Image (spheres, rainbow, N blue to C red):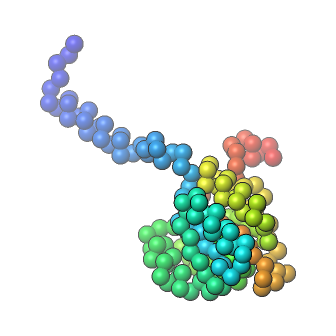
Amino acid sequence: MRQSSRRIFLKYALGGCAAGALIRPLSSQNTGMPYYKAVFDERFKVARAFAAEATMRAIPTAGIRGDVTSLFFNDLDLRWKQGPVWLIGLTTPASLFCVHLLARDQGMRLRLCRTNPDINAVTGVLDVSVLDGTLPRGGMTMHVASSGPSDLVLWIIAPSRAPIGRGSAKETANA
């Protein structure tokens, strides 16, 4: 057995510390992507149910009444200065339009959009995306141009480099 010197000990100790800083902790590997906020329009019963489901999954919620100005200035703008985040929402098309334009300036984009989803589809999107960190396939189904003011849109806005679909690259190529 070789005798260790202080220099060798320090070299290995420093290497171990550097490796530990580069490797993500094991506990965070299976948590999926955390949503920063679940935005909902509190004027609608389905949107309030969506907020309750998000709260049960420990996702912070932000209620609006059609106008996103206060949410943007008091919350999102301050957070986006630190970097892009995942947002999910169930709002009117007009609210989505505003949030999407503001988020696009921060390097984020609309990743999922479904018009008038039922509550089962909403909870399914919450379950899939939070559990495995991916978005459901066929996410961009939107016909907002013909939508009425009482229609709701389920949406996810995420950083531009976030994973898009489920499955491996091979499965996606064969689809």
Can residue 100 be seen from the camera position used here? no
| Quadrant location of the N terminus in the rendered image | top left
Residue 8 horizontal side relative to residue 150, left or right: left
Q: Position of residue 172 (x, y in %)?
A: 75, 47
Q: Nearer the viewer, residue 11 or 116?
A: 116
Q: Residue placed at 59% from the left, 69% from the top?
A: 38
Name the residue furthest right.
Answer: 146
Q: Residue placed at 51% from the left, 76% from the top?
A: 76
Residue 2 position by quadrant = top left
Total numbered labels placed on residues in the image: 0
Q: Nearer the viewer, residue 48 or 66?
A: 48
Q: Is residue 32 above or below residue 91?
A: above
Residue 174 horizontal side relative to residue 1, left or right: right
Q: Is residue 105 above or below residue 87?
A: below
Residue 167 position by quadrant = top right
Residue 164 horizontal side relative to residue 86, left or right: right
Q: Residue placed at 45% from the left, 77% from the top?
A: 78
Residue 151 position by quadrant = bottom right
Residue 79 horizontal side relative to residue 54, left or right: left
Q: Position of residue 6 (x, y in %)?
A: 14, 30
Q: Nearer the viewer, residue 66 or 29?
A: 66
Q: Residue placed at 66% from the left, 59% from the top?
A: 126
Q: Position of residue 112 (x, y in %)?
A: 71, 64
Can residue 56 be seen from the camera position used here? yes
Q: Is residue 14 above or below residue 44?
A: above
